[in-house]
Structure formats: structure tokens, C-alpha cells
Image (cartoon, helix red, strand yellow):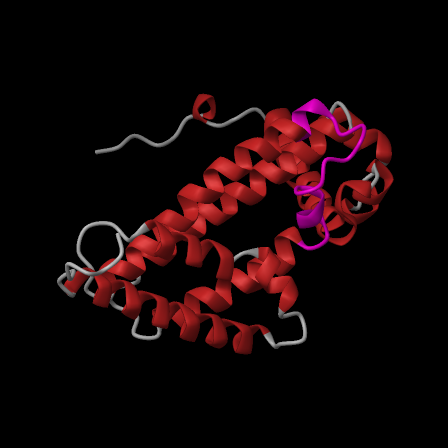
Amino acid sequence: MTSAATADDKPPLRAEHRSVTDARILEGAMAAFAEKGLEATVDDVAEAAGVSRVTVFRHFSGHGELFAAVITRIVQIYEEELTRLTSMYEVCGPWLASTATTLHEMNSRLWGRGFWDTHVRRPGTAPEVLAAISERFGRRNEFFEGLANAAWRARGGTGRAPRWVVDAFGVLLSTFTTGAMESYEVQDAGRLTARILSAVLSDGIAEQTTPAREDDEP
């Protein structure tokens, strides 16, 4: 029999309150980042979070630490979603369209304007933000590789998806592509992306199963 939790098992109220406030500030900072990118100020964050500027500085040392935490948290959200998406591919028929729709929606909501600031070296960007951006690129590649390999296996491919198939997933599900299709409803963008990626997968699998001819180029 498991004994009831004691008071010692619970976090102190002050620590619990701090954790809740941290999360609230981070949520506000993510909203400000999506709207204004790295030009968002601590005042913008405080307003979005519904707290005072002083409270923000009690929890984060400055603009750099705050927005480095935003970028890190966005990457974590994508990785959590990857786990969910890749666990569904065998049982979800329209998986590719659903996945593409989900990611285009996330790209728009989570990155927004801030996405462009992660691709332009802005003078005066805090070192911790630059470090978070650098880390994000490495983990982005792992994300799309995991997604492409899940789709590859679902379509009957063996081994790992070819590099060019992985790269096609990276391009077509990126925030660049989301931005290029901003005139589309998110479901339409997802369906179009899925059609193209389906053709990519079919071509890749056909290439894998078709014996190479002697006169084929290497």
C-alpha cells in the first residue's frame, strides 16, 4: 500500500508560485516574440503576461535570458509534438496531411515574426540568444529527420529515408514555406504540402526498389 503524500513531498509554496509566474512570463514572452520578434521589449512581455516590468526582472535577468528561454521552449514544444506525431503514423490514415497542417499552424503561431530574427544576424544580439539559435538549428535537423523517417516507414520504405527526402520535409514543412503560403487557409496549406511530400515519398521508394542500370548516372 502506498502511503499518503506528506507535506515534505510537496514543493514549498514560494517555489510553486515562482514556477507558475515563470511559466506565465514565458508564455507572454512567446506571444510577444511571435508578434514582434527580437524587437519585442520587456515592457511588451510584461503587458502580454499581465505582470509588471519589475516582476519580469525578478524572474529573468534581462532581455537576452528571457528570449533565449523563449527559443529553447519553442524547440521543446516541437520535439514534444514530434513524439506525438511519430507515434500516430501507423494508425492515422490521413497522417501526412494532418501532420503538415499541424506544423504549419505551429510555425505561424509559435515562430511568427520571430522566425526571421533567427535567420538574420542582428547587431547587439545577446550571446545567450545566439547560443539558443545555434542549438535550435541542430535540433531542427533532428526533428525533420525523425519526421521524414516515420513517413518513409509508413509508406513502406526500408532503412532510413534518403537525405534528399529528409531535406524535402525540412523545406516544405519549414516556417519559410508557411510564410510563402500565408494566403492559404492552414488546412489548405497542409493538404498541398502533403500532396507534394507524398510524391516525394513515392519517388524515393520507387528509386529504392528499381534496380540501377549500368548507364544510370551515379
Displayed quadrant of residue 20:
top right
Give how far across and how far down residue 132 sits, in percent: 60, 31
Can residue 108 be seen in the rendering of this structure?
yes
Q: Is residue 87 visible?
A: no
Say left or right for 147 vs 187. Answer: left
Q: Which residues are magenta?
A: 112-129
Q: Is residue 106 left or right of residue 49?
A: left
Q: Does 126 sit above or below residue 95?
A: above
Residue 96 position by quadrant: bottom left
Residue drawn at x 66%, y 43% is 119
Q: Quadrant of the N terminus?
A: top left
**Considering only vertical position in the picture, is 63 above or below 165?**
above
Q: Position of residue 5 (x, y in %)?
A: 39, 30
Q: Is residue 13 above or below residue 100?
A: above
What's the magenta bit mostly, secondary-structure-wise? loop
| Residue 2 among magenta residues | no
